[in-house]
Amino acid sequence: MEKLNRPIIALVCFLIGVLATNAQNPARSEGATPYTPTRLEWLAVDLQSLMGLDITTNPEGYGITFASSSAEENTILIYVTYLPTVRRELMNGDLEEARKFIASYATAKGWSSWLKVKENIKMLEPPK
């Protein structure tokens, strides 16, 4: 009789272990799924947090946004939008600072051999 109970006890222990493991690791929502950004994505986030300017809140009339391109291009994109009333010397100075910062960042990380920078500069129509 004791030999018959061993498989049942083993099965019960196994099921308890499975249930306990599932209780400790509940199903994750899509938003909680782990994600590892690329170097370009991290750089774009860093640049945006440090140097990004929102045209809607910048009294000088220009905005600067950073984004990563597809991984094959190895490129950081700088988008500059401005109003016709912008003080160009301020905008151009911030753009030059962004270029210098990206160059020094790439040098410090050892990325100078592959990291490229492209700019898209566009004037917007003034609000009516």
Image (cartoon, rainbow, N blue to C red):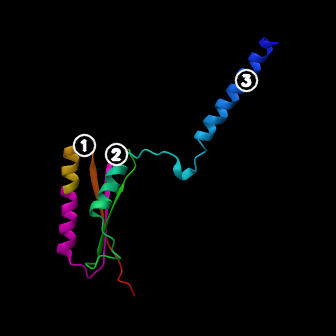
Residue position marked by numbered label 1 in the rendering:
111
Choose between 84 and 108: the one closer to the eye: 108
Instruction: Kindly indicate whether the residue at mark 2 contacts the one at mark 1 (C-beta within 8 angstroms).
Output: yes
Marks 1/2: CA distance?
10 Å
| Image point (31%, 51%), residue name | 43
Q: CA distance from mark 3 to mark 1?
A: 55 Å
Disc 3 residue type (three-letter): Leu
Q: Which residue occupies the extreme front position in the image?
A: 2
Is there any visible trace of residue 112 in the rendered image? no
Residue nearer the viewer, 7 or 34: 7
Residue 75, percent from left and from top:
32, 50
Badge 1 or badge 2: first in the primary sequence: 2
The quarter of the rendered structure image containing the C terminus is bottom left
114 magenta-colored: no
Locate residue 44: give its quadrant: bottom left
Q: In this figure, which residue is indicated by the disc labeled 2?
A: 39
* Magenta stretch, residue numbers: 75-100
| Distance (Cα) linking label 3 and label 2 | 47 Å
Q: Which residue is mark 3?
A: 11
